[in-house]
Amino acid sequence: MQLTGAEIVVECLKEQGVDTVFGYPGGTILNVYDALYKHSDEIRHILTSHEQGAAHAADGYARATGRVGVCLATSGPGATNLVTGIATAYMDSVPMVAITCNVNLPLLGKDSFQEVDIAGVTMPITKHGYIVKDVSILADTLRRAFSIARDGRPGPVLVDITKDVTANTCEYERKEPESAKKTGKYTREDIERASELIRASEKPYIYVGGGAVISGASREVRELSERIDAPVCDTLMGKGVMDGHSEYYTGMIGMHGTKASNFGVNSCDLLIALGARFSDRVVGNASRFASGAKVLHIDIDAAEINKNIRSDASVVGDLKEILQILNKELPKMEHPEWISHIKELKEKYPLNYDPEGLSCPYVMEEIDRITGGSAIITTDVGQHQMWAAQYYKYSSPRTFLSSGGLGTMGYGLGACIGAKTGMPDKVCINIAGDGCFRMNMNELATASRYQIPIIQVVINNHVLGMVRQWQTLFYEKRYSQTVLSDSVDFCMVAKGLGCEAIRVTKKEEVADALKTAVSLKKPVVIECIIPEDDKVFPMVPAGAPISEAFDATDLKNND
């Protein structure tokens, strides 16, 4: 049948099973929005307050559901406003398709009104980018975009379409979407070498990254841990793969990881890296990271092997598939002395915080208790992000959504809206510092417009907490531009944007505030006032080995 390019865009979205898109209209994308209007009963469009919010919402939707997230924007500033959200998705391997429209083909390259080469701008931060100048290739281009976004190691794909293509017509024929492809280059010898290293190890340690979430390998990772009697640590992106209540789980590794994980990895004889990329925030000083251990690296992306840390063996392919093979072949193993040592580390170095007064760790523990650990937690970036990772016990994957690789302040609220849209039966709570919340708090208007019942917790210490922590520890307390003590009233802002608001200043008020927020079934902001100098511990100084993690007690003893 003959359809316009705009109608083809909508039909292709329907082909791919897309039920929700996030975006903001403008001149060049009007034809697409007109087509969406006619299909509003099949595809829900969420009008965000800013295009960056649309990108983050598509990202949160994708992370929470495992499906491809979709965002839309017009040309020029509309398209460039997506860039931070696209880069966020790229760094964390999130499947997303960003559809933009550009000026008419004859106007390209002439500095026309609102013309930007968005495909060129986003080339370094997408898996692939297209500019469609011919309506006859539009459908196949969109289909390829979805395939590329979800196949192998996922990531964002940009499709830019000239406005005249959205108006032109051509023959369209529906096609069933292809199933996601798992790229694997491993051999039987790779599997045997991995098995050999595990069998020979007396002190194995499993290090889990975001790839384990993406591959859906949570059950296989837990089985491997029990089979080979090995402790497990995770990265920020790997939260929930291992049950946070498991006796084998030792917490997060890295700059703000637990001492048990950091010290344990430093003393293991085999580090099994599963879907992880050895980020600088994890390894610290690379030359001294797990220096006494052999490294077995399993990842779907061959480019990650030996990129940051040299491995003694590697298996390139889908993690879930590879672990299923290994779990069948490996014998049941026991390492009682090693497990006893790790248990001692956990008992000697538990996470702790000052029990007096209101603090973010206390708030996170109360959220965990009241939601039964079943909520989806999104975060912005900073101290609150680390506390959310440390003190909430994630028991299943896709329940902790955070900007790990790019560290995007302002990410969390849009992501929370996207997550709640994709997973309406889950309680979705965004944790933000006051500095982050300022950046995209306009998205509260989006939540109230659609009555999306997200809970926004603002941890307000009236400073840029993580930067201030560094200024305290390493810059002799020169607090350059990190103090936010002004007359901004977040509760009044929230009410002005159509949300309920609760201010909490005491520990005793936290539980009731959370219970009220959950029961209201509407967007609620809970502002928690905490001291300006609360710090995230443990901590590893930049460039130091993770074996040099320190906490408040160490600082006091050194003083």
Image (cartoon, rainbow, N blue to C red):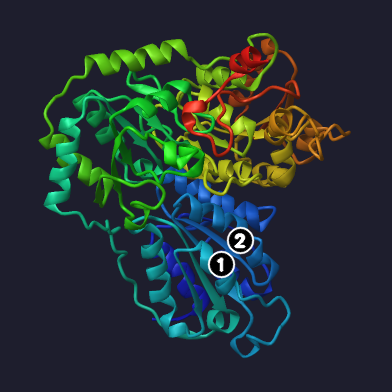
Residue 399 in percent (x, y) is at: 46, 35
Residue 317 in percent (x, y) is at: 25, 52
Measured in 3D between alpha carbons, the distance from the residue under mark 2 to the one under mark 1, in whole angstroms, is: 7 Å
Question: Is label 2 in contact with label 1 (beta carbons under 8 Å)?
Answer: yes
Position of the C terminus, as image quadrant, is top right
Q: Residues within 10 Å of mark 2 (few under 14, many from 20)?
A: many
Residue assigned mark 1: 122
**Can residue 38 be seen in the rendering of this structure?**
no
Residue 532 in percent (x, y) is at: 76, 24
Of helix, strand and loop, which one carries label 2?
helix
Q: Residues within 10 Å of mark 1 (few under 14, many from 20)?
A: many
Residue assigned mark 2: 83
Residue at 51% from the left image edge and 40% from the top image edge: 281
Q: Nearer the viewer, residue 277 or 459?
A: 277
In this view, which residue lies farthest toward the bottom?
106
Mark closer to the chain start, 2 or 1? 2
Residue type highlighted by circle 2? Val
